[in-house]
Amino acid sequence: MSLELYHPGLEGVIAGETNISCVDGEFLYRGYSVTELADGASFLEVVHLLLTEELPTQEQLADFRSVLWDNAELPESARRFVHDLPLHVSAIDMLRTGVSLLGNDDPQLEDSIVDAGVSQATRLLARVPLLLAEWKRQRDGLPSVEPSPILSYAGNLLLLLTGAEPDPVAEQALTSLLILYADDALTPSTFAARIAASTGASLISAVAAAISTCTGSQFSQQFSAVHQLLSSVDSRDEAVRLVRYRVGESLPLPGFRSACDTGPDPRPEVLERWCRELAQESGREHREEIADAMKWAIWDATRRSPLLEWPATRLVESMGIDRDLHSALFVCARLAGWAAHIIEQAEEGDLIRPRSRYRGAERNEFEPLSERG
């Protein structure tokens, strides 16, 4: 009998190769430092990089912005869909179905991903924020908000989701967050997108598959868990005591890496700087002091460093975006990475089909229904 290797959850298994992003050691998008991009590039520059493999020139970026703006309009069918939804439907569930609906109005739906992928991804990047804003305004009983051609992608997201002109610092902070969220190698959502693309599904169907994984509790509850942890204490001393208790009882520490994950991740520190700056601007310094005390108490006790969700949760709240929109905001950013992976998978043309190992009954004798009583 040949040796069969079994890796539950495919942990540690290399399931494919990619030219898009690297998370081993230094974090890179197409060979560029993710933190340098977050500090110095616009989100649309990074989108262009992920989709076309190169950073745009000024002329290319202007053309890209123009194409996005030309597509920044919701089909009437999408508006009706949002207005007909029950109030209990979450933002992420709305996007899962809404993205599929947008596909029905895509002029290149029947074209191959290789031929139409970049154009389809661009249309989704233009319309998904509008879909999310329409849902939020409908839920809150407010009139629709129109995007502005003079604002950045992040600035328009802030305008659409808060209804207010974006603060320049918040706009820059959100730009960094979107860039850091844009890709993260082969996460479950990206793997789902690539599996769908490998079957010949459309780009929009593959994106819908990716969003479906974000409705799961392991993803959707991570931001609320960080918020609950931070909100459960009112002082630095309480934060330290809570950490000691949770460590002593082996309770989860949401927003922090697992004990076995020891590689460096420079991304959280980029957002920590924005958290501090926004806190000073909005008078939330006390909240940041508690978060800082908790972070160092966890480090001292476990040597575990923060995940990106740790500063991102505070940052989103500081910008005035509703907490229950955080997962949907993540989708707006990750669309770029998903699309890049979907296109890459379609170009490779390989069907992703791992095996399973049967562990059921060896052999049951069949009895006709008449003999089973």
Image (cartoon, helix red, strand yellow):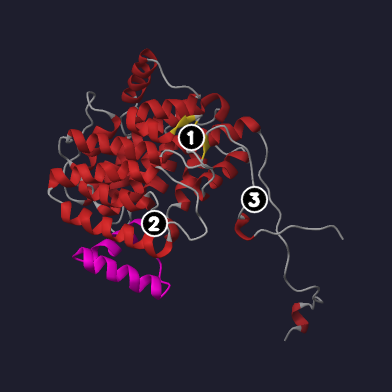
The amino acid type, in three-letter code, at marker 1 is Leu
Q: Which mark is residue 28?
A: 1
Residue 216 appears in the picture as rendered: no
**Mark toward the viewer: 1 or 3:** 1
Numbered tag placed on residue 151 in the rendering: none
**Quadrant position of residue 197:** top right
Q: Nearer the viewer, residue 1 or 194?
A: 1
Q: Is residue 182 above or below residue 318?
A: above
Q: Amino acid at mark 3?
A: Val
Amino acid type for the residue under numbered disc 2: Ser
Name which residue lies at 55% across and 24% down. 115
Measuring from the top left, give residue 240's x and y in whole percent. Answer: 28, 67
The residue singled out by tag 3 in the image is 13
The residues bearing labels 1 and 3 have C-alpha atoms spaced at a distance of 21 Å
For the point 33% across and 19% down, which residue is it? 66
Distance in Å between CA atoms under marks 2 and 3: 25 Å
- Residue 226 colored magenta? yes
The image quadrant that residue 335 belongs to is: top left
- The local crowd at label 3, few if under 14, some if 14 to 19, many if 20 or more residues have their Cα within 10 Å, is few
In terms of sequence position, does the residue under pointer 2 or pointer 3 come before the other? 3
**Residue that badge 2 annotates:** 220
- Residue 373 colored magenta? no
Q: Write down the region rendered in magenta.
A: 223-252
